[in-house]
Image: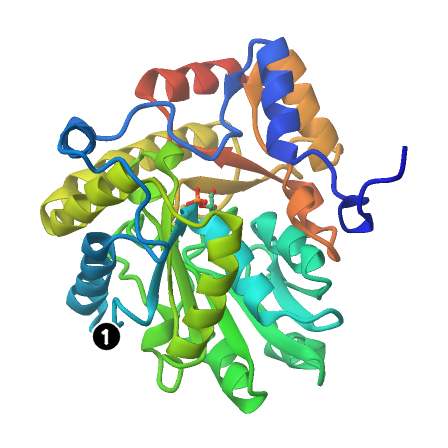
Amino acid sequence: MKDTAVRVADFKDSIFGVISKLAREHNAVNLGQGFPDFDGPDWIKEVAYQKMKDGHNQYAPFMGTQSLRQEVSLYYKKFYGLSYDPEKEITITVGATEAIYLVITALINPGDEVIVLEPFYDSYVASIKMAGGIPVPVTMHAPDFTIDKKELENAISPKTKLIILNNPHNPTGKVWSREELLDVSLLVEKNDLYLLSDEVYEFLLFDGVKHIPTATLEGMMERTITVSSAGKTFGLTGWKIGWICANEKVTKACRLVHQYVTFAVSTPMQEAVAVGLTKLSDYLPDFVNLYRSKRDFFYNELKNLGFDFKIPKGTYFMMVPIKNKTTLKDVDFALKLIQERKVATVPPSAFYLKSTEGESYLRFCFAKKEETLKEAAKNLQGL
Ligand SMILES: Cc1ncc(COP(=O)(O)O)c(C=O)c1O
């Protein structure tokens, strides 16, 4: 039988699948998977059911339902002062993952270079490769996961077309400062690039930190393609409703790809998320409090165990240094914790192409029930 396509030849099973399988085999508490082990709020699930009963069950318009595009546009205006035309600049996708794929496929020609800031969400590099593009890694250096401006500038070549930035950042929990975002955006402008800003954790911010959408920086509205999704915000990652906000030209190209990849996105779920977005102001304070208390609890547990790191200001991840605990690298230490401590984490070296800095860390996800976090902390006692 003939071979499958070269473009997938070097793809491997994602680290999440591998860790989850091992966690199941060893009956370990799973703090590896990046999603809650509890359900999102009942009220939005009831809206979804009602929307189904009301007959919102056939194909939606391919660019997304009118109601959801409208509500996405309204929240960007209300929260950030950004104006996106729901007809021409907003597209609904199957989660942020499809959004990322569409943007990269719509922009990248074979041989184009795309700068990825490592550690990165793993779909970026896969999407770049599927488009025939070349991922060019620039490291966010530990312990604060900052980029070196010169390193970034040196990574840009005449072939560079796009930089991908994720804020708030998975896996580190870092929230980019305005100054850091400005450093990147000045290089984007100077070199006539696009910036893909993955902001799926935009509402998961703690300690009074405010989200700064990259598109709000001077000169960046036209060049920034913002991707977000409802999964994290409503604790319903399985709903897979995401969106792209971009200028008309980029939106047109993304929609052309979308119509042949998924064509349309689940109608009742879009309708429910549209209602959910109207309730953000009431919903967010409790949502953030819930995750903040989980973060504080688990951070204190890890501190008491002797792990030394700064408390993350965003997302539901902690990137925890392991050097003072082991001479093993992340992958081996993660395996050891699963086997001997019954706690599963993600070894972050999978999120790097260039640097080995990830080998001295593990990523813990604290989006878990209180009892799950307590059990993990108990299993780790005496480590
Ligand atoms: C940084 C980042 N971007 C995108 C996604 C994908 O989001 P979605 O589930 O909406 O496809 C995730 C999910 O974990 C993520 O962490």
Instruction: Name which residue lies at 75% across and 32% down.
Output: 328
Check disc 1: other Cα within 10 Å, few if <14, some if 14-19, many if 20+.
some
Residue furthest to the left: 282
Q: Position of residue 297 (x, y in %)?
A: 33, 30
Q: Is mark 1 within 8 Å of ligand 1?
A: no
Q: Tell me if 379 is positioned left or right of 232 in this view.
A: right
| Marker count (numbered) | 1
Instruction: Name which residue lies at 57% across and 23% down.
Output: 344
Instruction: Name which residue lies at 19% across and 27% down.
Output: 49
Q: Secondary structure at mark 1?
A: loop
Q: Tell me if 13 is positioned left or right of 38 in this view.
A: right
Q: Quadrant of the C terminus?
A: top right
Q: Position of residue 19 (x, y in %)?
A: 62, 25
Residue holding disc 1: 83
Q: Is residue 64 above or below residue 18?
A: below
Q: Position of residue 341 (x, y in %)?
A: 59, 14
Instruction: Name which residue lies at 40% across and 81% down.
Output: 220
Q: Nearer the viewer, residue 256 or 197?
A: 256
Residue furthest to the bottom: 190
Q: Is residue 218 above or below residue 244?
A: below
Q: Nearer the viewer, residue 223 or 269?
A: 269
Q: Quadrant of residue 136?
A: bottom right
